[in-house]
Image (tube, helix red, strand yellow):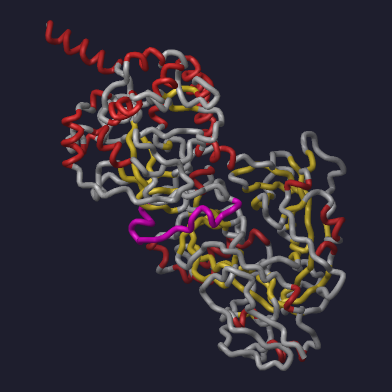
Amino acid sequence: MENTKELTEHSSRVERKHRDSFGMFDGYDSCSEDTSSSSSSDESEEEVAPLPSSLPIIKNNGQVYTYPDGKSGMATCEMCGMVGVRDAFYSKTKRFCSVSCSRSYSSNSKKASILARLQGKPPTKKAKVLQKQPLVAKLAAYAQYQATLQNQAKTKAAVPVEGFSWGSYINSNSFTAAPVTCFKHAPMGTCWGDIAEGVRVEVPNTDCSLPTKVFWIAGIVKLAGYNALLRYEGFENDSSLDFWCNICGSDIHPVGWCATSGKPLVPPRSIQHKYTNWKAFLVKRLTGAKTLPPDFSQKVSESMQYPFKTSMRVEVVDKTHLCRTRVAVVDSVVGGRLRLVYEESEDKTDDFWCHMYSPLIHHIGWSRSIGHRFKRSDITKKQDGHFDAPPHLFMKVKEVDAAGEWFKEGMKLEAIDPLNLSAICVATIRKVLADGYLMIGIDGSEAADGSDWFCYHATSPSIFPVGFCEINMIELTPPRGYAKLPFKWFDYLRETDSIAAPVKLFNKEVPNHGFHVGMKLEAVDLMEPRLVCVATVTRIIHRLLRIHFDGWEDEYDQWVDCESPDLYPVGWCQLTGYQLQPPAPQSSRDSQSSSSKQKKKAKSQQYKGHKKMTSLQLKEELLDGEEYSFLQGTSDQESNGSASYYIKQEP
């Protein structure tokens, strides 16, 4: 009984011992100079490779000095290593927890104190007493932090896709995903920073038999959009317990979070026997490594706040008549995507999905201001609770100068067909509106009343000068019923007594977008815009991307601009709580030539338009026209500047 009592008292004392700067239980670490040196000699790990410099650097005592710019938050005493609320620290600089630590820092005891901490020795009695001073403030800050995490977790409810896992899909096929920085409109798209392979984080330890939730440090092995393949520290080249998780999830923290929040760091059960001094192991492995910024979770939460609210009224394209707009009301907002219900829909089933930065939505009064057709609502006054969305919330277009040489009615050009986004077609400017907007019709398939004309802005990346497809080796869809094949622009312009829109009026800006052929992403099926699907970039023509929906035939590919708000990083659906459409299963691909066409056609009825004829293969030859000549462009590569991939030959 006495031995049992002694063991109980001993374990109680162990739990009461001061947690070290990693938040480790002292019971998992025998801290002495001998074990430290032997552990160091036994280790054979390579030095941590240098990583981008913008992420927080883990100091040589294992603790991350949070908020080095002097802003409020947690702070670490540079003398004794105590962690506490910054406002409770001493002096204007808040570098020390007390007057004595400030004085001791400049004395000869500084070196001995830091050396003792690195060797795993407990802090001095004085440091233990001083730790009580900011305890209340620390607990209050921690409670506030936990509340923030809980609110954040509510907006991150994962939507599981039965039978599909991005991690397994990428691992089994060695796929590469487009980086988050390619998607400026997505959460963290503009503040992703230098998160890359090798960055260390603190995550829950699932290889543990303890009844409470404990954590351990893991390193990023591979990144795929928001998703990261993680490996627990200490597993070296052993990938048996590697796991995928969303790096923006509420359980992912920067190194040092356990120490500041009082959570224990416990090594995985599978490797507990590998080292006797885990503290020394972590010091060696983490010194000089990079971790997430201390405010990473806050940035994630802020980037998922959207200005559009339910009950806001907007003008949006009429999906049954593309030539006009209608009033719709925001019914829900998911990840920046809006479910809009047309105002006249009594049962709220007549809806339309688009992103808040889509060029298809505008503020109330936009149609009248530019001369666009508009369907007036039978509802004479706003319904209770509905209000107009402020104009500043909508995506701004570039200003244009239409005073000089400008687009004119009847001019010919090439345009992505809004009813068949896999095709670029021969098109005509049917009407010139105000503020740079144009009404475009697809030659050979226009409705007599112009109900399928579509509005593009002059700077739109979806319209191109005559000859764009030819020089970039893209199939151009000729007018329906046009018999003189292969299609040649020079002959067609002469036959129709038309002129081509001047090349200099088109948008030739090509951003450094970062996409490459073969990259995976999540993309909206714009023929059924409520669906977000697993997709692949298959071609890149300057800023134009060819998006293939995995598991579907190539004829359902879509041409999309590199800055389209309908493209998202891998993991976006999980992060925002949106349903992801997985690839068509292998069993159905063999019979896809018949079954998938019917299924996809049913999806395409969203626009209620006629499906355009399949593009005809054109021979790869330069135009032999007298008025225009072209520079040969590259086919499947992106251009990082204002590309001169077409020019007008001066007479």
- Is residue 173 part of the magenta span, yes or no? yes
| 57 and 126: which is toward the camera | 126
Stretch of the chain drawn in magenta: 165-185
54 shown above or below 121: below
590 shown above or below 347: below
Q: Quadrant of residue 2?
A: top left
Residue drawn at 50 percent across, 51 percent down: 580
Residue drawn at 41 percent across, 25 percent down: 106
Residue drawn at 34 percent across, 51 percent down: 49
4 shown above or below 397: above
Q: Is residue 16 left or right of residue 620?
A: left
Residue drawn at 66 percent across, 93 percent down: 624
In this orientation, does residue 417 appear? no
Q: Is residue 344 left or right of residue 201?
A: right
Residue 362 percent coordinates (x, y): 76, 52
Total count of labels: 0
Residue 557 percent coordinates (x, y): 54, 68
Residue 192 percent coordinates (x, y): 52, 48
| 387 and 228: which is toward the camera | 228
In this orientation, does residue 476 appear? yes
